[in-house]
Amino acid sequence: MSNAQTQKLILDPGRAAKNYWLDLFRYRELFLILAWRDVLVRYKQTAAGAAWALLQPLMSIVIMTVVFGTLAGLPSPHNTPYAIMVCAAMLPWQFFSNALSLASQSVVSNASLISKIYFPRMIVPASSIVVSLVDFLVACSILVGLMIWYHFWPTWRMLVLPPLILLAVVAALGPGLIITALTVRYRDFRMIIPFIIQFGMYVCPVGMSSDFIHDKLIAKLGSVLGEKFFMLYSLNPMVGVIDGFRWAILGNASVFYWPGFILSAILALVLLWVGVHYFRNTERAFADII
């Protein structure tokens, strides 16, 4: 008799929801394979390779520094080098925008795999976010270079970056799951995503600091109404992520607004919960639609 062990996949009606999270763990190797495949495609089958992960955020940092810092003369906290302030915000924003873009196309791009075999479909958009995370880590070399150039040395707050990166992943995964499911049903969303990303950068504190926005709202609307509008502004989950990155990278030069950060973090978790439930309720029809 053969000693080889075989695994059986039993689809028991009415128990799919209970077994789903266990299936996600069982298919962890598929998650790693898909993520590794996407990283290889990103870095081996492109002409620029890793240079593209550096060029895109670098050009954005240069343009924003010139436009907002030099021409518009916007201030940076405690005279921090404007390029470093922009870079501290551009890194998480670039991760979020890339993750959203890649996740939205992930299921459609893997149509042949989706239509042939069973596995938890959430693996596909989740694995695509790994590519954006690798791009983020590569782009962090820009921040290191700027800190060396401006002789701006980090503080102990840099140790808080790992949980902030995890918060950025949560902020990207929730909307990513929603948009992925919508893109499968309505292919027009492929045209809408670039507009959403472009518009989103201007409602995030990328080219200017949140304390500058806070002070302007207070000056224009008064303390009470200004605080209310700033809390409304903080409903954007990326506001909290960007403010957290600046707090960690700029050290004592950064002004941190805890109520806005907490509100952004809560909304990121709520969007993740909504995204998971909406994706779970629609993924059973993916194979038929695709």
Image (tube, helix red, strand yellow):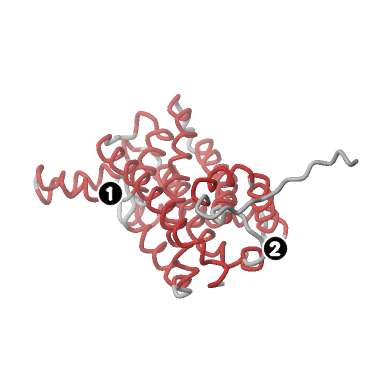
Residue 35 rendering spot, x and y as whole percentages? 64, 51
Residue with the most extreme right position: 1
Judging from the image, what secondary structure is the residue with disc 2 in?
loop
Residue 36 in the image, given as x and y percentages of width and height: 68, 50
Quarter of the image holding residue 71? Answer: bottom left
The residue to which callout 2 is attached is 47
Query: Residue 78 at x, y = what percent?
Result: 31, 35
**Mark 1 or 2, closer to the camera:** 1
Q: Amino acid at mark 2?
A: Ala
The C terminus is located in which quarter?
A: bottom right
Of residues 211 and 71, the one drawn nearer to the viewer in this rendering: 211
Q: Quadrant of residue 201?
A: bottom left
Q: Residues within 10 Å of mark 1 (few under 14, many from 20)?
A: some
Q: Quadrant of the N terminus?
A: top right
* Horizontal relation, residue 217 to residue 22: left or right: left
Q: Residues within 10 Å of mark 2 (few under 14, many from 20)?
A: few
Q: Nearer the viewer, residue 64 or 230?
A: 230
Q: Which residue is mark 1?
A: 235
| Residue 111, horizontal then vertical, whole percent | 62, 68
